[in-house]
Amino acid sequence: MSVLTVQSAVQPLGKTPLAAYDLWKLYGKTSVVQGVSLTLNPGEVLGLLGPNGAGKTTTVGMLYGAVIPTRGFVKFGQIQVQTNGELARAKMGIVTQEDNLDPDFSVIENLIHFAHHYRIVGKAARLRAGELLAQVDLQDHAQKNIDELSGGMKRRLVLARSLINHPDIIFLDEPTTGLDPDARQEFWKLVTDLKQQGCGVLLTTHYMDEAQRLCDRLMLLQSGQVIDQGSPAELIERAVGNEVVEIEGIAEETVRSLADQANTWYRPFGNSYLIALPIQPDFLAESLWQQLSDLQPQRLTRRQANLEDVFLHLTGGRLQ
């Protein structure tokens, strides 16, 4: 059975929004998350970006009720998550960074046994497991042991497991870390399918291409606080502009002086510097580019701005 055939047979996903209000989390006197508010709508992919220690995993934990906020609250439709976590999680799916599949069970048995948590048993559990294996294109591996699967197959199986209860919301915590490019592309297709089915998806990732490809909106976190948010295109245009230049082999004082003259910004970027080409007035971008070219640097590259440039500009450091 094809993936498309199975998806048409699967029960439609729900349309319950998730909203967080002024979330704080303190451990002792240390603030891990400070004042985070967000809304995740049906059929939307919301990305949380930030370096390790930015508060992403703690925020996600508060959203599905595993972590109790010090202040603030989360509502899933009319359900308050912190006081009715079990009820809320009955319509949520969670893909953690670890596969945590049971090696004592086969591929399909992992799904059947997990279905019991939602009181799906017997023939219904086996039917649901078969539907999901087809949905993630693992139907030909149903009887294999877990250790026979590739890393990409394991991630797809974990995603299938998170869908066992027809969730309205899916939390994906760095789901493609460690996967090769082909496996990542396969996983991206599955996430896009979920969005099209009306599922709300919250994604944390370190991969800028993944965020730009999948997310409708992004929130950038640093030190537990939201430092900017918007669509990928909005963030790039607002924070960086259209184009940037990478230049190597020129003294920082020279780079700083040219950036100041053009009323733009620069940042160290490995062994080079990153300079944003100004958008307005039009002639300034070409003028700055010509001045940089005239310096005859060791390396000079002009390219389209991207999300990693946004993060570098806003935080002074690279995401990975």
Image (cartoon, grey):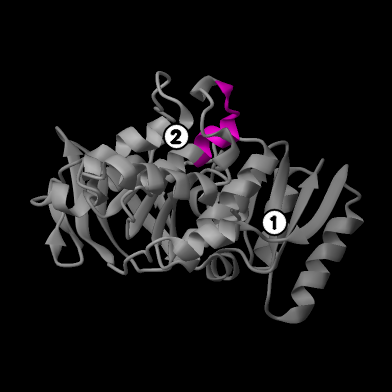
Question: Which residue is at 38% across, 66% downward?
Answer: 12
Q: Residue at x 66, y 36 (%)?
A: 180
Closest to the observer: 15 or 126? 126
Q: Residues within 10 Å of mark 2 (few under 14, many from 20)?
A: many
Over which residues does the magenta segment extend? 148-156
Q: Is residue 60 above or below residue 17?
A: above
Q: Quadrant of residue 149?
A: top right
Is residue 12 visible in this depiction of the protein?
A: yes
Q: Position of residue 271 (x, y in %)?
A: 73, 36
> Is 61 left, or right, of 153 in this rendering?
left
Q: Secondary structure at mark 1?
A: strand
The residue nearer to you, when weighing 171 against 139, is 139
Tell me if I can see residue 310 in this picture. no
In this rendering, would 249 be left or right of 151? right
Of residues 97 and 320, the one nearer the viewer is: 97
Q: Are marks 2 and 1 in contact (CB under 8 Å)?
A: no
Type of the residue with mark 1: Ile
Which residue is found at the position 82% from the left and 71% from the top?
A: 286
Counting from the top left corner in percent of width and height, residue 15 is at 31, 69
Q: CA distance from mark 2 to mark 1?
A: 52 Å
- Identify the residue position indicated by label 2 in the image: 108
The numbered mark, 2 or 1, whose residue comes first in the sequence reads 2
Of all residues, the one furthest to the left in this rendering is 83
Disc 2 secondary structure class: helix
Looking at the rendered image, the disc whose residue lies closer to the viewer, 2 or 1, is 2
| Residue 179 vs residue 152, the one in the foreground | 152
Q: Is residue 71 magenta?
A: no
Q: Residues within 10 Å of mark 1 (few under 14, many from 20)?
A: many
The label shown at residue 275 is: 1
